[in-house]
Amino acid sequence: MTTNRREHHGSSAPGRAAGAPARHSHKYPPSGPLVIDIRDLGRQPGAGRDVVTQVPAPADLGLELIKIPQDSTLELDLRVESVAEGVLVTGTVRGTAVAECGRCLTATTEDVQVNLTELFAYPGTKTDETTEEDEVNRLVDDRADLEAVIRNEIVTELPLTPLCKPDCQGLCAGCGERLEDLPEDHAHELIDPRWAALREKFSGAEPGGDDHDDS
């Protein structure tokens, strides 16, 4: 007796039009010092562990005038915990940024600390299927890549105009030297450029004197 059976070769998955792309394309497992492997949690809500470690900072972590140098130390003090829809990552990240003072251009450093509270959704969950790619983080092969999250938090925390100290006086408008390094009575005579040539012409004349010989 022969059983009738339909075989599908190269057809699309049921419920999706032929040629339509899957919601999430295949992604290779992320790797790097800011990737946390959570396979040991086993998707069991309530299971978790602490992640306390030091890792090298990625490149371009900051803004034009202030950034955490590549390969400098980032201190992670995190808790990863499995919840129904994914893995919740909470805790702090610390680093030291190098900067150029926006007023006096002196090199300076600034301690940076950001707080994380981020959900990484499990594939196939309601959160995964009902939110856009940029609305929630996602686990890829049971790994949570923290780099983009940490980068966003640190860039948001950094000042647009870093200062060596809050009351920095900046640079002298006349000579360009740091006002902090100049004496209190430092000053420059301000001359209207329209009169500069005339001043130079008569700079050798005595006040009220006559510059020609009457003899």
Image (tube, grey):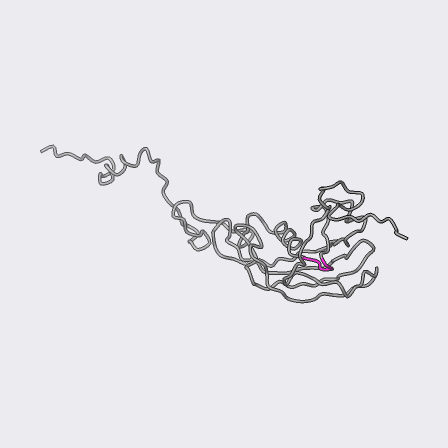
| Residue 142 placement, left or right of 3 | left
Question: Which residue of the protein is positioned furthest toward the right in this rendering?
Answer: 1
| Residue 61 placement, left or right of 79 | left
- Give above or below for 175 relative to 199: below
Q: Quadrant for residue 73, please give it.
A: bottom right
Question: Which residue of the protein is positioned furthest toward the front in this rendering?
Answer: 1
Q: Nearer the viewer, residue 62 or 214?
A: 62
Residue 91 horizontal/vertical position (percent) = 72, 59
- Count the marks: 0
Task: Please report the residue visible at 45 percent of the width from the left and 49 percent of the height from the top.
Answer: 171
Residue 22 horizontal/vertical position (percent) = 73, 46
Q: Nearer the viewer, residue 167 or 50?
A: 50
Residue 64 horizontal/vertical position (percent) = 53, 50
- Give above or below for 191 relative to 92: above
Task: Please report the residue visible at 21 percent of the width from the left and 36 percent of the height from the top.
Answer: 209
Q: Nearer the viewer, residue 153 or 102?
A: 153
Q: Quadrant for residue 94, please give it.
A: bottom right
Residue 143 horizontal/vertical position (percent) = 71, 60
Secondary structure mostly seen in the magenta stretch:
strand
Q: Quadrant for residue 82, please give it.
A: bottom right
**Residue 26 within the segment the image draws in magenta:** no
Quadrant that contains the C terminus:
top left
| Residue 52 placement, left or right of 104 | right
Task: Please report the residue visible at 70 percent of the width from the left and 56 percent of the height from the top.
Answer: 115
Which stretch did the figure color magenta?
141-145
| Residue 203 placement, left or right of 5 | left
